[in-house]
Image (cartoon, grey):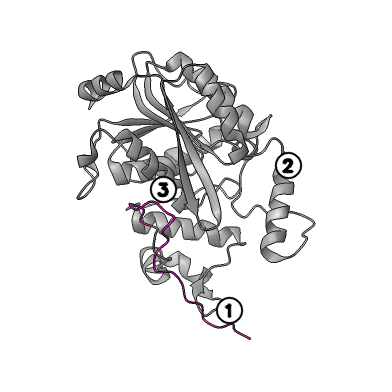
Amino acid sequence: MGGKKREHAKEKTKLHPRSKHRSRYDFTALISSCPDLKPFVHLNKYKDLSINFFDAKAVKMLNTALLLHHYNLEFWDIPSDYLCPPIPGRADYIHNVADVLYRDKPEMLVGGIVKNNKITCLDIGVGANCIYPIIGTTEYGWKFVGSDIDKNAITAATKIISENSSLKTNVEIRLQPSSRDFFKGIIKEGEFFDLTICNPPFHGSLEEAERGTKRKLKNLKGENKIKPELNFGGKSNELWYEGGEIKFVKDMIYQSRQYKESCMWFSTLVSKESNLEIIHKLLERIEAKEVGTLPMGQGNKVSRVVIWTFLSKEKQKAWQEKKW
């Protein structure tokens, strides 16, 4: 028996005002842009068009449709066992750090975004999906370098770039030879980045990742599944890091000091609010000039981006005048 049709908010107000995803999914339009999505779309018990968000193939196809429809891609695909991230949350990261990047040039965001291909962003852990470069290039015209330690992820991301004319001259993928380095081996001598971004591994081990997924599924479905199913996929280096998110971020912060003249702003997603105090104290200890926390909300989930710089406001202004 079907449920009563629900009334939905017309706009997802927790998402960034410039987000393309504030409205509910328009499955008719998405199918028009990506016909392969159609077999996965059905009426749910509330008489709304939807997909089965516990079906990894359906989630991957929805992501494909969103990228083709909203970001003018011609091709997007990832290996079946790699992370398939939720697009709205990734877009919010880009929009929020853009607000910081353009805070002294607000005219570039008013009355339509002024795209600037002189701005270069480093995506640490670009993954097979290449999501951040896709969004940042399409929305703001930024150039990107994406790094990763996984050769297969590098191959998949490189194929996405080569198959999309909008990305070919704007995104470069580099293999990080060391699993413990973030900037060394990637930033070349004399190279400068306006921004670095990162989506750290959330868990400290495979076992922790599986426990977290099992708990999430139980909460959502009211079932105690014996074997967790990661509906968004993910390889080990994408999901966990020895010491977890806090160790990963602390290692990145310490290493960022060595490149304080090569990057204007560093940033990272921080999923666990309890990690913020430790992160801010560390940034204060290593004498970051400015530190900020940018809150983000998607539905019931709350996340945030921590952003920092070692450049004074005067040096930031000089940087922009010289580089932009």
Magenta stretch, residue numbers: 1-20
Circle 3 packing at 10 Å, graded few (<14), some (14-19), many (20+), is many
Q: Which residue is mark 2?
A: 208
Q: Give the secondary structure at mark 1.
A: loop
Earlier sequence position, callout 2 versus callout 1: 1
- The image shows residue 9 at horizontal and vertical percentages of 43, 69
Which residue type does callout 2 highlight?
Glu
For the residues labelled 2 and 1, say whether their Cβ atoms are less than 8 Å apart: no
Above or below, 298 against 295 in this view is: below
Q: Main secondary structure of the magenta part?
A: loop
Above or below, 158 against 37 in this view is: above
Q: Which residue is mark 1?
A: 45
Earlier sequence position, callout 2 versus callout 3: 3
Q: Which residue is mark 3?
A: 91
Which numbered dot is residue 241? Answer: none
Q: Is residue 322 left or right of residue 257?
A: left
**What residue appears at the point 71 percent right and 36 percent down from the top-left corner?**
205
Q: Give the secondary structure at mark 2.
A: helix
Above or below, 205 against 84 in this view is: above
